[in-house]
Structures are given as C-alpha cells and as structure tokens.
Image: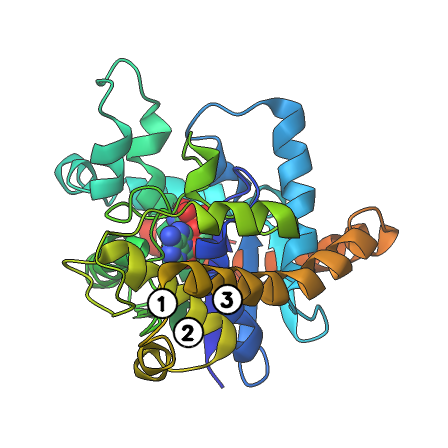
Amino acid sequence: MSTIFSGIQPSGTLTLGNYLGAMKHFVDLQEEDNCYFCIVDEHAITVPQDRLKLRENIRSLAALYLASGIDPDKSTLFIQSEVSAHTQLGWMLQCVSYIGELERMTQFKDKSTVGKEGVSAGLLTYPPLMASDILLYQTDIVPVGEDQKQHLELTRNLAQRFNSKFNDIFTVPEVSIPKVGARIMSLQDPTKKMSKSDENQKSFISMLDDEKKIIKKIKSAVTDSDGIVKYDKENKPGVANLLTIYSICTGKSIPSLEEEYKNKGYGDFKQDVAEAVVKTLKPIQERYEELIHSDQLDEILDKGAEKASFTANKMLQKAKKAMGLGRVK
Ligand code: TYM
C-alpha cells in the first residue's frame, strides 16, 4: 500500500481543470492506498484573500472533495492550517532552500510580475511549505496536474538534501501526472491553462456552474475557422482542449471522437461536449448541495485534522531531532 498526498488551494470555486487534472484521480486512489487530501489554506494566503470569502471557500472545497467521491472512512481529509506541523516543518525546509532555486519557480515568476515590492515573501517560500505538506506523511506518490511538476521536483531535491545533510528520514516522493487532462486549457485562450483566478469568467468552467452557464461557455469557446474536429495541439489548441475534456468526461478515446465527428461541424460538437460536462458535474453538484450546510462536514474535518496531526507530529519530531532543534527529551 502506498501513501498518497495531494492538496488544493481554497482560492475560489474549483474549475473543471482542477477536477479533471487532479480531484477525479484522487477518488480512484483511495480504494487501494493510504490517502491524505488537504485544503491548503496557508498556501492560499500567499496572495491577498478576503477573510470571509476564504472561510467560505475552505468549507466549499471540503464539500466538493466529498461530493466528488472522497470517502472519509478511506481517506484523511483535512485543513492545512489545522495541523500546525505543516508551517513548522515548512520553516525548517525554508532554511534548507536556496533563494535562487525558489526564484526560478515558474509559478513565482508568473505571479510576481508586479515587482518584488508588490508580492509577499510567502509567494517565494510557497514551495518549501508544499514540500512540508508532502514530506510529513512519508508520501510515496503525489497526484497533481502538470503545472505542479516543478514544485514536485523541488520537493524531491529538498528531501534528498535534508536526508544527506542531517539524517535520512524523508521518503522521496514520486509525482503522478495523468496522461490525458494534465493541463486543461482556458476556453478563451487555449494556449493558457484554465485557472480559477482568471479574470475572464468565460475562460473557465467552475465545478458549480449550472447547466445553462456550462453550455454558454462551451459554445463560446475559442476554436478556429477550418471546421474540422481533429486533435492537433499546435495548430488547433481550442479543438484539442475540447476533445480532451470530452474524452475524459465520456471515457471515449480521442481517435474514436475524431471519427464520430468526421462529418459534423463545431456546433454539434460543442453541444455534445457541453452535455458531457453537465452530465459529469451534475451529480457532484447535487451531493454538494446536501453537504455544504451539514454538521457532518465539521465532524469529518475535525477527525481528519486529528488523524493528520498524529502522523505529522511524529515526523516533525524526527526532523527537529535531525536538525538539532529544542532539547533532547
Ligand atoms: P491548485 O490549487 O492550483 O490546483 C489543484 C490541483 O489542480 C491541478 N490543476 C489543473 N490540472 C489540469 N488542468 C488545469 N488547468 C489545472 N489547474 C490546476 C493542479 O495541478 C493541482 O494538482 N501548489 C498546489 C497545492 C498544493 C499541493 C500540495 C499539491 C499545496 N501543497 C502538496 C500537492 C501536494 C496548487 O496550487 O494547486
């Protein structure tokens, strides 16, 4: 049995990209493995957040995890800030990280274009906190979308560096990125990834969008003018993105979809993609509505934090001992 860890930021309602690239895969993993799924609220505050909105997003993300099929009897679901070992080990890992390697992270570069006076130090030290999330649980595998690959490489480097400098205590995790859907693209600019922080609401489908909105957004998705439903990421990124979404939502292969739409136009194609997305999200949305106001949600999160703390604290003690922090007890 492997240990799995993954996290999602509560920085807005999740997109179809988050679901198809990450969350959907979590559900299958919990059948065989020891899984930890985290609501990484401390990562979310690396950029400004409205206090009340953040609280709402944390609860909403917990309900979405459960609605999408995370079973609290099989997986540990918890909030990062409720397990203090994360920031404690995060600090220690910051002290083994180099500023240079953190400044080279593409996500830091993309988000810090306003200049060093305009971004928080937390945005720079975000990856050692992520490494801490993962390393506290002796994680073997981290299922994520493609945009997290670089952070995972850094996590591996930090684990190896710590193990060789201090003591060999951390498991060096492997990353698991899905073959299809690891990078769902924006519907308005299919050369950019679909993101919940995009200002253009038409560029992403939120997991809680209703049927009408989903249909409207997919119908207005940017494609091209040649009218052929074919997977060509370079020359037809919009159509390739819709084919990817359609394929994951229906389980049909991309070549079989190309064949099915050989003599049809984009109108029919988009209508069917939209219906497939609605069919995928609707059952999740229905369960979400039942869960969002239930006390059950708090009980699950309390139990999750308790379970996660137990494991994380043991690892934290080992790391403190390895670095010589505190006293020998
Ligand atoms: P976050 O919150 O940005 O995204 C959560 C997960 O969704 C994936 N994802 C996508 N997959 C496909 N297409 C997209 N357009 C798309 N957008 C997002 C992400 O790759 C991710 O798997 N740093 C992480 C959160 C984190 C974490 C961790 C992850 C904190 N600690 C420990 C794993 C392990 C993040 O910002 O993800």
Residue 290 vs 249, above or below: the answer is above
Mark carried by residue 243: 1
Distance between the Cα atoms at labels 2 and 3?
Answer: 11 Å
**Assess mark 2: CB under 8 A from ligand 1?**
no
The amino acid type of the residue labelled 3 equals Asp
Local crowd at mark 1 within 10 Å, few (<14), some, or many (≥20)?
many
Marks 3/1 in contact by CB < 8 Å: the verdict is no
Residue 49 vs 22, above or below: the answer is above
The amino acid type of the residue labelled 2 equals Ser
Tell which of 290 and 108 is nearer to you: 290
Residue 140 vs 275, above or below: the answer is below
Distance between the Cα atoms at labels 2 and 1?
Answer: 6 Å
Q: Secondary structure at mark 2?
A: helix
Which numbered disc flags the more N-terminal residue, 3 or 1?
A: 1
The answer to whether residue 155 is left or right of residue 289 is left
Residue 21, percent from left and from top? 42, 62
Q: Nearer the viewer, mark 3 or mark 1?
A: 3
Residue matched to label 3: 272
Q: Quadrant of residue 180?
A: bottom left
Marks 2/1 in contact by CB < 8 Å: the verdict is yes
Mark carried by residue 247: 2
Mark carried by residue 208: none
Tell which of 199 and 262 is nearer to you: 262
